Image (cartoon, rainbow, N blue to C red):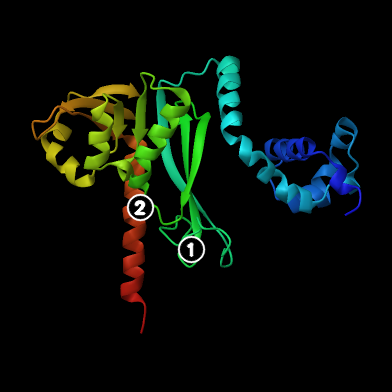
Amino acid sequence: PEGREEVPWPVVVAILVIARFCDPSSELHIEDTWYRRTALEDLLGVAAEQVHTDRLYAGLDRLLPYKVAIERHLKQRLGDLFDLKYNLLLYDITSTYFEGECAGNPMAKRGYSRDNRSDCKQVCIGLVVSRCGMPLGYEVFRGNRNDVKTWREIVTTMEARYGKADRIWCGDRGMMSKDNIEFMESENRRYIMGASKGTLKKFERELLESDWRAIREGLEVKLCRSPDGGKETYILCRSRDRREKGFFTEFSGCRRRKFRIRKPE
């Protein structure tokens, strides 16, 4: 639309970022309602009639070529402002799905859907954050990529970007595999990964003993050597919140099974 293409891309991105911080919503909501209710028209010198979804939708595409530079800048800036430490990094995967065929997106594939939409194509997003939750970087993977297969790539990518500092990498049991452990130990990287439920059964005696160390109210831990005689150290955790969640999950499952049994034909 005439005049709207004159809004500089940095200003378009600024509108998107401010909206995300102040009132997370869709681009359509920004155009129809949100922008007109703010002081941005005066602060940015852009009339509400010039803010249009066509340009808002394309704003992040303009940032993509500068992704690495932006992440490096944010790491430095946030580190200075909040005295952040990046000696412990947490990594996890999520996914987002698309409606439609997504024929033009080669990364959109059908895979394990965290949204229970296995009928839709999706992409996986791997996010690395500091111990206090500040983002360090992210990568986008094909929608059919297994979590465990992303670990090596994300570690090497972050090391190439920020160096091989003396840090600890943390991941859940979805990242655990023999190959990943060998990769981490090949260059003496430190890591904490969630153990499989089968492995936990080997610590039944330790779980019953009383020599637990209280970290905070409702959370206790103890360190144990590998039951197989390996050099790994296991951290056993006993969490009140986790126990209550487990009880609730089991109770909900029992109720569903009971309902199915009683449901008439």
Front residue of this view, candidates 62 and 208: 62
Q: Residue at x 45, y 62 (%)?
A: 110
Q: Secondary structure at mark 2?
A: helix
Q: Residues within 10 Å of mark 2 (few under 14, many from 20)?
A: few
Q: Which mark is residue 225?
A: none
Q: Which residue is mark 2?
A: 249
Of label 2 and label 1, which has the lower sequence position? Answer: 1
Residue type, numbered disc 2:
Thr
Compared to 40, does 33 lie above or below?
below
Left or right: residue 177 versus residue 218 is left
Q: Quadrant of the N terminus?
A: bottom right
Residue 195 appearing in the image: no
Q: Would you name the residue on which mark 1 appears?
A: 117
Of badges 2 and 1, the one in the foreground is 1
Q: CA distance from mark 2 to mark 1?
A: 22 Å
Badge 1: few (under 14), some or many (20 or more) residues near its Cα, within 10 Å? Answer: some
Q: In the displayed structure, does residue 254 sit left or right of residue 140? A: left
Q: Position of residue 55 (x, y in %)?
A: 77, 49
Q: Nearer the viewer, residue 200 or 159?
A: 159
Residue 221 image position (x, y, % from top left): 26, 27
Q: Position of residue 263 (x, y in %)?
A: 36, 77
Residue 18 sits in quarter: top right
Disc tally is 2
Query: Mark 1 belongs to which amino acid?
Result: Arg
Q: Residue at x 61, y 30 (%)?
A: 70
Residue 164 can be seen in this image: yes
| Residue beneath the point at 42% across and 59% down | 111
> Which quadrant of the view contains residue 62?
top right
